[in-house]
Amino acid sequence: MALINCEECNKDISDKAATCPHCGAPTGNAPEQTHAADPNAYIKCGTHYIVEQKADSFSVVSLLTIPMFLVGLGLFLINWLAALIVIGLAFMIDHFGRSKKNVLVCPKCQHSPS
Protein backbone atom coordinates (compact mmCIF):
# COMPACT_ATOMS: atom_id res chain seq x y z
CA MET A 1 0.00 0.00 0.00
CA ALA A 2 1.36 3.38 -1.00
CA LEU A 3 0.26 6.93 -0.27
CA ILE A 4 -0.75 9.17 -3.13
CA ASN A 5 -2.03 12.75 -3.28
CA CYS A 6 -5.72 13.39 -3.81
CA GLU A 7 -6.40 15.35 -7.02
CA GLU A 8 -9.07 17.49 -5.31
CA CYS A 9 -7.70 18.37 -1.85
CA ASN A 10 -4.03 17.37 -2.30
CA LYS A 11 -3.94 15.34 0.96
CA ASP A 12 -2.28 11.93 1.38
CA ILE A 13 -4.58 8.95 0.77
CA SER A 14 -4.15 5.25 0.17
CA ASP A 15 -3.71 4.15 -3.45
CA LYS A 16 -6.32 1.44 -2.79
CA ALA A 17 -9.03 3.86 -1.56
CA ALA A 18 -12.11 4.20 -3.78
CA THR A 19 -12.74 7.78 -2.61
CA CYS A 20 -10.76 10.37 -0.67
CA PRO A 21 -11.69 10.20 3.03
CA HIS A 22 -11.13 13.96 3.35
CA CYS A 23 -13.16 15.41 0.46
CA GLY A 24 -14.97 12.40 -1.07
CA ALA A 25 -13.43 12.72 -4.53
CA PRO A 26 -13.20 9.44 -6.48
CA THR A 27 -9.70 8.04 -6.98
CA GLY A 28 -10.52 5.87 -9.98
CA ASN A 29 -10.19 2.61 -8.00
CA ALA A 30 -13.93 2.20 -7.47
CA PRO A 31 -15.87 -0.06 -9.83
CA GLU A 32 -18.03 2.05 -12.14
CA GLN A 33 -21.08 -0.24 -12.00
CA THR A 34 -21.81 0.79 -8.39
CA HIS A 35 -22.63 4.33 -9.50
CA ALA A 36 -24.44 3.33 -12.68
CA ALA A 37 -26.56 0.76 -10.85
CA ASP A 38 -27.61 3.21 -8.12
CA PRO A 39 -29.16 6.42 -9.54
CA ASN A 40 -29.63 7.86 -6.02
CA ALA A 41 -25.90 7.85 -5.24
CA TYR A 42 -23.87 10.99 -5.81
CA ILE A 43 -21.09 10.16 -8.27
CA LYS A 44 -18.38 12.20 -6.51
CA CYS A 45 -18.58 10.59 -3.07
CA GLY A 46 -20.92 7.61 -3.66
CA THR A 47 -23.22 8.55 -0.77
CA HIS A 48 -26.99 8.11 -1.12
CA TYR A 49 -29.02 11.27 -1.41
CA ILE A 50 -31.51 12.04 1.36
CA VAL A 51 -34.69 14.09 1.03
CA GLU A 52 -34.84 17.43 2.85
CA GLN A 53 -37.66 19.93 2.94
CA LYS A 54 -36.61 23.43 1.89
CA ALA A 55 -38.84 26.48 2.20
CA ASP A 56 -39.09 28.98 -0.63
CA SER A 57 -36.91 32.03 -0.06
CA PHE A 58 -39.73 34.50 -0.77
CA SER A 59 -43.45 33.93 -0.95
CA VAL A 60 -46.71 35.86 -1.03
CA VAL A 61 -47.04 35.31 2.72
CA SER A 62 -44.02 37.60 3.18
CA LEU A 63 -46.13 40.52 1.93
CA LEU A 64 -48.19 40.11 5.12
CA THR A 65 -45.52 39.10 7.60
CA ILE A 66 -42.89 41.77 6.87
CA PRO A 67 -45.23 44.72 7.65
CA MET A 68 -46.59 42.77 10.63
CA PHE A 69 -43.05 42.37 11.97
CA LEU A 70 -42.34 46.09 11.51
CA VAL A 71 -45.55 46.99 13.36
CA GLY A 72 -44.44 44.68 16.16
CA LEU A 73 -41.12 46.51 16.39
CA GLY A 74 -42.97 49.82 16.61
CA LEU A 75 -45.18 48.47 19.40
CA PHE A 76 -42.16 48.03 21.67
CA LEU A 77 -42.39 51.74 22.49
CA ILE A 78 -45.97 51.36 23.73
CA ASN A 79 -46.41 47.81 25.05
CA TRP A 80 -43.66 45.21 24.99
CA LEU A 81 -46.03 42.29 25.56
CA ALA A 82 -48.24 43.19 22.59
CA ALA A 83 -45.09 43.65 20.50
CA LEU A 84 -43.85 40.16 21.35
CA ILE A 85 -47.24 38.67 20.48
CA VAL A 86 -47.38 40.43 17.09
CA ILE A 87 -43.79 39.49 16.22
CA GLY A 88 -44.40 35.88 17.30
CA LEU A 89 -47.53 35.70 15.13
CA ALA A 90 -45.59 37.13 12.19
CA PHE A 91 -42.93 34.44 12.51
CA MET A 92 -45.52 31.67 12.87
CA ILE A 93 -47.50 32.83 9.83
CA ASP A 94 -44.29 33.10 7.83
CA HIS A 95 -43.04 29.65 8.86
CA PHE A 96 -46.28 27.74 8.28
CA GLY A 97 -47.40 29.78 5.28
CA ARG A 98 -44.38 29.25 3.06
CA SER A 99 -44.58 26.43 0.59
CA LYS A 100 -41.96 23.73 1.08
CA LYS A 101 -40.47 21.46 -1.53
CA ASN A 102 -38.56 18.21 -1.24
CA VAL A 103 -34.93 18.46 -2.35
CA LEU A 104 -32.36 15.68 -2.72
CA VAL A 105 -29.16 16.43 -0.78
CA CYS A 106 -25.99 14.43 -0.22
CA PRO A 107 -25.57 14.18 3.59
CA LYS A 108 -21.80 13.91 3.32
CA CYS A 109 -20.92 16.88 1.10
CA GLN A 110 -24.28 18.78 0.96
CA HIS A 111 -24.41 18.58 -2.86
CA SER A 112 -27.83 18.90 -4.48
CA PRO A 113 -28.41 17.48 -7.99
CA SER A 114 -30.73 20.30 -9.05
Image (cartoon, rainbow, N blue to C red):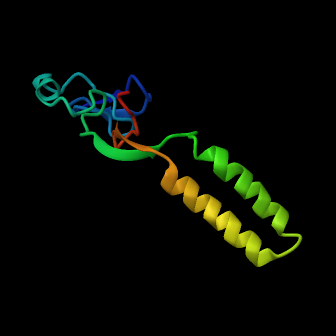
Does 1 sit left or right of 98 as displayed? Answer: left
Residue occupying the point 19% across, 25% down: 29
Above or below for 86 versus 31: below
| Residue at image location 39% in from the left, 35% down from the top | 23
Task: Report how many numbered discs are placed on residues in the image.
Answer: 0
Image vertical order of residue 41 relative to residue 86, above or below: above
* In the displayed structure image, the side of residue 91 where residue 9 appears, left or right: left
Check the picture and name the quadrant holding the C terminus: top left
Percent x, y of residue 75: 82, 67
**Residue at 83% from the left image edge and 69% from the top image edge:** 76
**Relative depth, front residue between 16 and 18:** 18
Q: Quadrant of the N terminus?
A: top left
Please name the residue shown 49% across and 56% down the image.
96
Q: Which residue occupies the foreground of this view, 60 or 40?
A: 60
Corner quadrant of residue 22: top left
Above or below, 92 against 51 in this view is: below
Locate residue 49, reporting x and y percent.
Answer: 28, 39
In the image: residue 90, left or right of residue 55: right
Which quadrant would residue 42 be assigned to in this image?
Answer: top left
Foreground pick, 41 / 67: 67
Q: Position of residue 51 (x, y in %)?
A: 31, 44
Q: Is 91 rendered above or below residue 18?
A: below
